[in-house]
């Protein structure tokens, strides 16, 4: 298995300014706010609910949720993101396979573009960790084997483990098998709807 600590260091400035992330530094705040607004619209959370973004990158969603008046935090493995995030005071190092957080400590947990870096056998462990720390709602966005963006030619990402990607049906089945009930997509149209993007309720 690839050394994860070495992998974390590869999520550096060069990574976030090339390939599929060419525009990330200029777009992450607006995209994060788009996600935050849609989350609030869709799940109608109480103001007391706490949000966690696992694999939050530079923290666009955390920033967006806080602008909307919600308590939001993030975990990230990239030293570059942890140091350069505009909301770094709300972020901490955290591997999706071993989150440094208490059980049921967040009402809402989301993860975007984090699971597809894992080997197939590790996805189950990651989802169990998310199930452990969330108490109500889980949202996941992910490139799957049958996603239109699963193409290194058009969406280059040297760290994405293409051969280990689950299909959309496999990922959905695994999430529900762990103990989540599917609510439906967060985005049903537009650019954010093109990948696997589903809300689940913890049961």
Image: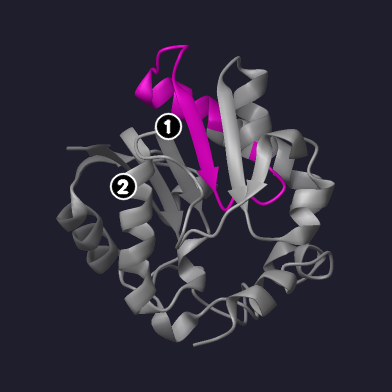
Tell me if residue 55 is in the magenta stretch. yes
| Towards the viewer: 29 or 192 | 29
Question: Which residue position holds label 1?
Answer: 106
Where in the figure is residue 43, as x and y percent of width and height? Answer: 36, 24
Say which element carries label 2. helix
Q: Name the residue furthest top.
A: 47
Q: Is residue 135 above or below residue 198?
A: above
Q: Is residue 48 above or below residue 51?
A: above
Residue 190's disc number: none
Q: Earlier in the sequence, mark 2 or mark 1?
A: 1
Q: Residue at x 48, y 49 (%)?
A: 111
Q: Quadrant of the C terminus?
A: top left
Query: Mark 2: few, some, or many residues within 10 Å (few <14, many ≥20)?
Result: many
Q: Is residue 11 above or below residue 66?
A: below
Say which element carries label 1. strand
Q: Residue at x 38, y 17 (%)?
A: 44
Residue 131's disc number: 2
Q: CA distance from mark 2 to mark 1?
A: 10 Å
Asked if the residues shown at circle 2 and circle 1 are in contact, with their CB atoms under 8 angstroms apart, the answer is no
Q: Is residue 130 visible?
A: yes
Where in the figure is residue 167, as x and y percent of width and height? Answer: 31, 71
Where in the figure is residue 142, as x and y percent of width and height? Answer: 45, 59
Highlighted range, magenta: 36-60
Where in the figure is residue 40, as x and y percent of width and height? Answer: 46, 22
């Amino acid at each position: 298995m690839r050394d994860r600590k070495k992998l974390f260091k590869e999520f550096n400035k060069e990574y976030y300014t090339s390939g599929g992330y060419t525009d990330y530094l200029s777009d992450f705040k607006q995209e994060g706010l788009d996600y935050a607004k849609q989350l609030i619209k869709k799940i109608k959370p109480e103001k007391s609910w706490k949000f966690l973004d696992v694999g939050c990158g530079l923290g666009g969603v955390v920033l967006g949720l806080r602008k909307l008046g919600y308590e939001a935090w993030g975990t990230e493995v990239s030293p570059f993101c942890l140091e350069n995030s505009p909301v770094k005071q709300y972020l901490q190092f955290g591997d999706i396979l071993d989150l440094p957080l208490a059980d049921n400590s967040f009402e809402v947990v989301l993860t975007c573009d984090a699971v597809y870096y894992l080997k197939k056998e590790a996805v189950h462990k990651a989802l169990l960790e998310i199930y452990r720390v969330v108490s109500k709602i889980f949202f996941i966005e992910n490139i799957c084997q049958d996603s239109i963006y699963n193409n290194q030619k058009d969406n280059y990402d040297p760290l994405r483990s293409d051969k280990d990607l689950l299909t959309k049906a496999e990922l959905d089945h695994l999430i529900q098998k762990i103990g989540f009930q599917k609510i439906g997509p967060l985005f049903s149209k537009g650019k954010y709807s093109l990948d696997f993007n589903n809300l689940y309720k913890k049961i």
